[in-house]
């Protein structure tokens, strides 16, 4: 049951200290300005805890666990650690854990209004400017994964408490790509930062995403053949197993190979990772973002993001005669529909077989 104690504060105001005690759960308390607010919080909580007690299986700290503690448990779960997306998931959940207010909020106190406020903060409070709806949704989706795990597997959220807020509507996929002048300006601006310049060239040459670049290892790259393998694993003899079905081998242009070769001969070289900082440690996403922002600004680019380097790769290939199937193969698209955004760049162009077709037609009676 709930108890309500009126207290006088140092600033001469009063508050209602509300304590909820239900057998089988740790007591939880919260202060409110009015009795109405206190009851509005305590009464539904009592009902939820009583219902959970009837069903059984709930943990004693159900009413007291904080969002930060829930995230920590979720990330420490073996099934979560086994996910291929674990690193990205961890990075996105770090935003929630790092917020002093959100991370200390009890999970049972989190509802639609709290998450809407967090969503607005995500959109407008980025260190490097506002975030796009897609980026905000990925942060929300990461927390939703933890939320559903807490409901369905950890008994930390009552099963009837479904995820309470909708994701944002995302605009249709954009195809912003560099003009020849912008490309020259970008590579010129990056000359003082050989590491990021090499990353830019590899991204332009292969269409790799930023996350894929940051995970690259020297053993994934064959400088002699001009290829790199994504998802590479080693066989029992410690050799690259390129027959593994999850491996995707991508061609690397000579310009990118030259940039990588220069890094391999640089002053600071890691035996494992090609893209490192002055201490030889792998670049982090946040550190790369800072260095990219300087180069981006120096090049005078407008409305251009790192991911648009991937679009630039696809666009140049499409405009230079590659088929949409070939473009999709380079980018690693799982569905042809993902490549169709570049179809306008190949419309009307002759494809393989057109010359032979024309020859037959010319010879027809």
Image: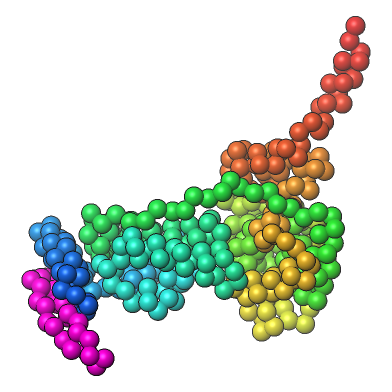
Looking at the rendering, in which quadrant would you find the N terminus? Answer: bottom left
Left or right placement of residue 126 versus residue 319 in this view: left
Q: Is 283 covered by the magenta stretch?
A: no
Instruction: Name the residue rendered at 72%, 61% in the picture.
Output: 302
Give the image location of residue 204, x and y in percent: 75, 57
Q: Is residue 242 above or below residue 109?
A: above
Left or right placement of residue 141 versus residue 239 in this view: left
Nearer-the-camera pick, 57 or 156: 156
Instruction: Name the residue rendered at 84%, 55% in the picture.
Output: 180
Give the image location of residue 2, x and y in percent: 10, 73
Nearer-the-camera pick, 176 or 291: 176
Give the image location of residue 149, x and y in percent: 33, 59
Q: Is 10 covered by the magenta stretch?
A: yes
Left or right placement of residue 90 versus residue 190 in this view: left
Q: Is residue 288 above or below residue 224?
A: below
* Residue 225 visible in the current orientation: no
Q: Is residue 202 above or below residue 353?
A: below
Q: Residue furthest bottom?
A: 10
Q: Residue furthest front?
A: 12
Looking at the rendering, in which quadrant would you find the C terminus? Answer: top right
Q: Tell me which segment is drawn in magenta.
A: 1-29
């Amino acid at each position: 049951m709930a108890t309500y104690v009126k207290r006088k504060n140092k600033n001469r105001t009063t508050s209602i200290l509300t304590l909820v005690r239900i057998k089988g759960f740790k007591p939880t308390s919260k202060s409110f300005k009015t009795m109405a607010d206190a009851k509005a919080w305590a009464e539904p909580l009592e009902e939820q805890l009583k219902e959970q007690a009837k069903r059984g299986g709930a943990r004693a700290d159900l009413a007291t666990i904080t969002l930060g503690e829930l995230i920590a448990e979720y990330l420490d779960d073996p099934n979560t650690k086994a996910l291929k997306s674990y690193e990205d998931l961890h990075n996105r959940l770090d935003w929630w854990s790092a917020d002093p207010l959100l991370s200390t909020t009890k999970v049972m106190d989190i509802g639609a209004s709290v998450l809407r406020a967090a969503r607005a903060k995500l959109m407008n409070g980025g260190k490097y400017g506002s975030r796009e709806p897609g980026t905000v949704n990925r942060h929300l989706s990461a927390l939703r994964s933890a939320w559903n795990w807490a409901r369905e597997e950890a008994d930390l959220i009552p099963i009837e408490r479904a995820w309470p807020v909708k994701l944002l509507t995302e605009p249709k996929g954009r195809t912003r790509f560099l003009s020849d002048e912008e490309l020259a300006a970008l590579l010129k601006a990056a000359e003082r930062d050989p590491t990021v310049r090499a990353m830019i060239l590899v991204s332009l040459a292969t269409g790799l995403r930023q996350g894929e670049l940051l995970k690259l290892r020297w053993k994934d790259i064959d400088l002699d053949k001009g290829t790199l393998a994504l998802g590479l694993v080693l066989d029992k003899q410690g050799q690259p197993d390129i027959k593994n079905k999850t491996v995707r081998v991508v061609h690397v242009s000579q310009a990118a190979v030259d940039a990588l070769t220069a890094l391999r001969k640089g002053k600071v070289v890691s035996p494992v990772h090609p893209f490192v900082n002055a201490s030889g440690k792998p670049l982090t996403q946040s550190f790369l973002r800072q260095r990219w922002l300087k180069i981006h600004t120096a090049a005078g680019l407008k409305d251009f993001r790192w991911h648009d380097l991937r679009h630039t790769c696809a666009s140049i290939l499409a405009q230079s005669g590659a088929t949409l199937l070939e473009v999709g193969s380079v980018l690693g698209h799982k569905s042809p529909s993902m490549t169709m955004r570049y179809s306008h760049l190949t419309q009307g162009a002759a494809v393989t077989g057109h010359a032979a077709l024309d020859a037959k037609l010319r010879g027809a009676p």
